[in-house]
Amino acid sequence: MTTTLPTALSVTGATKRYDSGFTLEDVTFDLPAGYIMGLIGPNGAGKSTLIKLILNMIRRDAGRISVLGMDAVADEETVKERIGVVFDTSCFVETWTVGKVERVMRPMYRAWDGRAFDGYLARFGLERGRKVKELSRGMQMKLMLAVALSHDARLLILDEPTSGLDVLARDELMDILAAYIEDGEHSVIFSTHITADLERAADFITYITHGTLYFTGPKDEFEESFRVVKGGPDLPDRLPDGAVVGVHRYATGFDALVRTENLPHLPADEVVVEPASIDDIIRLTNTGRTAAGEV
Amino acid sequence: MRATLISFRLDMARVAVGSAGNLVPFVLPLFFAVVFGMAGRDGGSGFGIGGVTGSTYGVCSILPIAAFACECQEGHRRMNGVIPANRTHQVFGRYLTLLAFALVFLAEMAAALGVVALVQGGGPAAWGSLLRSSALPGVWCYVLLQLVLFPLFYRWSDVRRALLALCGLFLGFAALVALAVTFVPEPALDAFGGALDALLADPGVGVPLGVASLTLAAALSLLASVRLQRRKEF
């Protein structure tokens, strides 16, 4: 994906090999400034590995990562002044109070805005005297978000922020992210396996499966690139090779994922064609007859 | 420098957690000072000083262990990936905490030795003598021990393994001493010990030697810790 817009995050050929045999291989994508990117994929795909690479929490075996125009390793100190991070669980010491979290985090950032932090505490209903361990999971996420939003971070990185949250909390988070990017100078990348969140908020999608980049680009283009084709149980074996990205068979028929441009090659009178949701694409690219190179 | 201070403040915040109950261990050396001071009143002052020094060691050893252990618990290490400080800064910040812990150790020793001097009927002069003869060497030993321990903590995230490795080093050192005692003639050992004692008793020699040795140990320890931390994955 190429873009002439200012880039909040640029990942080029990022590769990480683990001794276990899992490899995140050659991931390349750009996040233009002022947009939200959803990083999706099944469990174990490599989403958190990619986020750890961006945060320099693990070593890259290859590739380059640039955050807000700065090298993620060489300029790590400056980069981290300008980004906010929210993990799926709290990273604060659980015996700290909310007030102590502020006292600890405030001196770390030159651009810390105490009034903004107070505002987020009030909005999220966080009391300064409460200990982190006394907060629910959703409230702990909101505390991390309050910290991340209180030092003029230009890029928010969220790793599975909505896992374990109820639908109201997830909606609230998506509203906050949408407001965050409104001025065009702030950007968000968040990993999730709850695709409903993406439907609401994401402008771009980067889809990783089995450690490989499957797709990166506008969300609408992702969904429009595929169709779900349904038909009788004997049909999949008669479909043209290469036309089907992935197929799920069941007793009475099949669901197959087909690239839109390959639809004319299918027997139109024997199949039903439906739009593909993000869930469909993820599900059907992780079954048999799946080829990552089919992007 | 700013990034190092950020790391230092984070580590101090990690250690200084919990309620006032966490301060109770730091009262123990003062309690032991009363007990050992009374026990050493009739000529056994060395026993009293040893007890005070040992209890202060024991209590102050908690501090660096707490810094490393807290970092590894419950995903707190992820904060290292969030704060605006790279791994080298984080190591330097952790070593700055050692300075702070050494000051706590010195203060604790000074207070406990003051209690010993008081219990044994000595005055400020006795206290000053105890500070020179016990507190300063005690701080030197405490810092040296931590300078050996820190790279072990960076090598093994599991604090217990690091402490086991330290035990192994002590056993190795004890074996060397045993060999020396076995094979070096006793007069030679006595002469060596006497000369060393006389040398270190002179503050003009002992203090610079202590500072120089700690500086060298700190440099080697820092180098090892930075290399180990840079290779780590969170």
Image: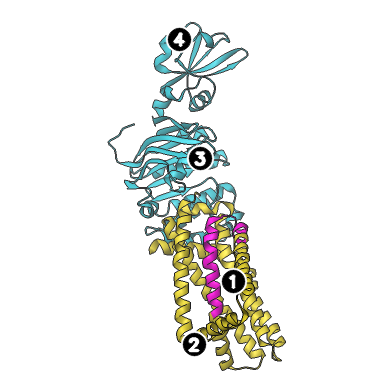
Chain colours: A cyan, B yellow
Q: Which residue does the numbered mark 1 point to in the structure image? A: B60
Q: Residues within 10 Å of mark 4 (few under 14, many from 20)?
A: some
Residue in the image at 60% along x and 60% along y: B165
Which structural element holds mark 3?
A: loop
In this view of the protein, which residue sits in the foreground, A230 or A69?
A69
To which quarter of the image does residue A217 belong? Answer: top left
- The residue pinned by badge 2 equals B202
Q: Name the residue type under label 4.
A: Leu
Nearer the observer, A271 or A172: A271
Report the mark closest to the observer, 3 or 1: 3
* Element class at badge 4: loop
Can residue A245 be seen here?
yes
| B189 vs B76, nearest the viewer | B189
Above or below — where is B29 with respect to A229? below
Q: Tell me how far mark 3 sits from mark 4, CA to CA.
A: 41 Å
Measuring from the top left, give residue A111's x and y in whole percent. 37, 57
Q: Are marks 3 and 1 in one subunit? A: no
**Which dot marks residue A18?**
3
Near mark 1 (Cα within 10 A), the count class, few <14, some 14-19 or many ≥20, is many
- Residue A266, which numbered label? 4
Extent of the magenta region: B137-163
Where disc 1 sits, the SS reads helix
Which mark lies nearer to you, 4 or 1?
1
Sequence-wise, the earlier of marks 3 and 4 is 3
Which quadrant of the figure contains the C terminus of chain A?
Answer: top left
